[in-house]
Amino acid sequence: MMDKKSERQWEVQSALDTLQRAEKIKKDSKLMSDVKKAAMDEVKRLQSLTGSISPKKTLPRKKTLKRK
């Protein structure tokens, strides 16, 4: 069993590895295209289980007020 500090270090390193992998995926246009298709297939599959409507392409962004 890992102590809390070791567990946290492992968690941080894992997150860093994930972010680095995501950057590599974004740069590989063919792989990114395949990932998007797979994600949409998964969304459709999950929606068929719930009976919801088709997914939106993007989520709307919230507008924020600029502070002076």
Image (tube, rainbow, N blue to C red):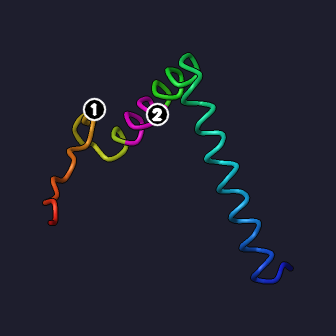
Task: Depth check: give the residue in front, 42 or 51.
Answer: 42
Pinpoint residue 29: horizontal percent, then vertical percent. Answer: 53, 19
Quarter of the image where one finds residue 10:
bottom right
Classify residue 31 as left or right of residue 46: right
Dot 2 falls on a residue whose secondary structure is helix
- Prevalent SS, magenta region: helix
Mark 1 neighbour density, 10 Å: few (under 14) some (14–19) many (20 or more)? few
- Helix, strand or loop at label 1? It is loop
**50, above or below 38, in the image:** below
Task: Give the residue number, with chain letter if any, for mark 1.
Answer: 57
Q: Nearer the viewer, mark 2 or mark 1?
A: 1
Q: Is residue 50 left or right of residue 8?
A: left
Say what amino acid the circle numbered 1 marks: Lys
Disc 2 to disc 1, how far (Cα)?
A: 12 Å
Relative to 66, does residue 33 appear above or below in the rendering?
A: above
Q: Residue at x 86, y 79 (%)?
A: 1
User: Is residue 17 found inside the magenta-colored segment of the image?
Assistant: no
Where residue 53 appears, x then y in whole percent? 22, 38
How far from the left and from the top, in percent, is residue 4? Answer: 75, 82
Quick check: 18 above or below 37?
Answer: below
State the image quarter where residue 51 is shown. Answer: top left
Q: Quadrant of the C terminus?
A: bottom left
Q: Earlier in the sequence, mark 2 or mark 1?
A: 2
**Does residue 18 appear left or right of residue 26 in this picture?**
right
Q: Residue furthest front?
A: 68
Range of magenta residues: 39-46
Is 21 on the left or on the right of 6, as rendered?
Answer: left
Q: Which residue occupies the foreground of this view, 8 or 46?
A: 8
- Residue with the mark numbered 2: 39
Q: What residue lies at 54% left-to-right and 30% top-to-bottom?
A: 26
